[in-house]
Amino acid sequence: MPPDSTHFTRTVHQADAIAWLQQTPVLTGCSLVASMPDISEFPSYSPAQWKEWFVQTAQLILSRTPDDGVCVFYQSDIKLDGEWIDKGFLCQKAAESSGHALLWHKIACRVEPGRVTFGRPGYSHILCFSKQVKAEISKSTSDVLPDLGEKIWERGMGITACALIAKFIAEQTATRTIVNPFCGQGSMLAVANALGLSAIGIERSAKRAALAEQLNVSADLKSWKRPPS
């Protein structure tokens, strides 16, 4: 049976996520989920400048997460000029500096195991942090996701990954709203609603923000129900 729509909401702010977070106090009753922009979106930044931006932004997101909520990062590493930039490490660096513990670290396969990739590794990180929440061992899930699930767009979060995150928040925290800075076309928001959670997205692009307001997911959490074009 689908969740009662009177018990959850969805709000999308067409705004710069960093400015919005800076103007917002700790988001009581919420857990935060973020997939932060890649270095390719900062053409004027050196790798060192982008890493500094990434850690500072992760710290900002963590700082707006209430102690009884969780903060989840979904990130894919990059290979740049013969070097590997580990975003999982950068997230953990930010979390350690702010006193957040790592509850779990999942690996989600972007391509089938054994396939060689070039610009990006064949997997993404999903890391969950909190100050007070502790993961229940009896409710553990697989540490490796064989695939991300269907994506609404190339930079979007896979539906399987979104469901894993939303189910954990629904089952193992007292928070009932997911806040998703850099929400893109709304993958995380749609899955949150499908599982009975309210959702708040922040997206700078007006076109993507409009799509994020309307995206839905099938009842079996296997495919997207795209808004009419």
Image (cartoon, rainbow, N blue to C red):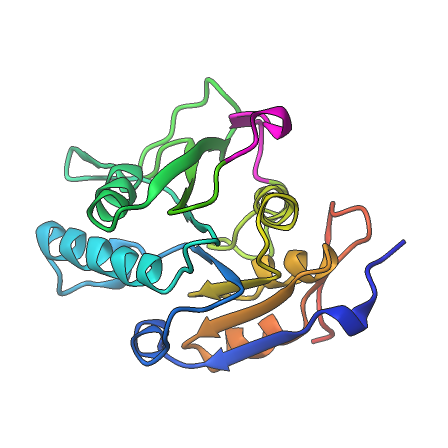
114 vs 39, left or right, is right
Nearest to the observer: residue 40 or residue 220: 220
Q: Is residue 116 left or right of residue 139?
A: left
Measuring from the top left, give residue 123's x and y in whole percent.
43, 33
Residue 189, visible in the rendered structure: yes
Total residue callouts? 0
The answer, for residue 40, to whether it is visible in the render is no
In the image, what residue occupies the spot 13% across and 65% down?
Answer: 44
Please provide percent x and percent y for residue 35. Answer: 41, 54
- Percent from the top left, x then y, of residue 229? 69, 76
Outermost residue, top side: 114
Task: Report if residue 162 lies within the magenta region.
Answer: no
Most common secondary structure along the magenta stretch: loop
Q: Position of residue 143 (x, y in %)?
A: 51, 25
Q: Residue drawn 45% across and 69% down? A: 27
Q: Quadrant of residue 87?
A: top left
Nearest the viewer among 186 and 65 is 65
Quadrant assignment, res 43: bottom left
- From the viewer's side, name the closer residue of 60 and 53: 60
Q: Which residues are magenta?
A: 135-148
**Quadrant of res 149:** top right
Compared to residue 227, the image places residue 78 above or below, namely: above
- Does residue 99 sit above or below 201 in this rendering? above
Q: Is residue 123 left or right of residue 151?
A: left
- Residue 147 lies in magenta, yes or no? yes
Furthest toward the right, the residue is: 1
Return the residue nearer the eye: 14 or 39. Answer: 14
Q: Above or below — where is 100 with respect to 138?
A: below
Q: Residue at x 42, y 65 (%)?
A: 182
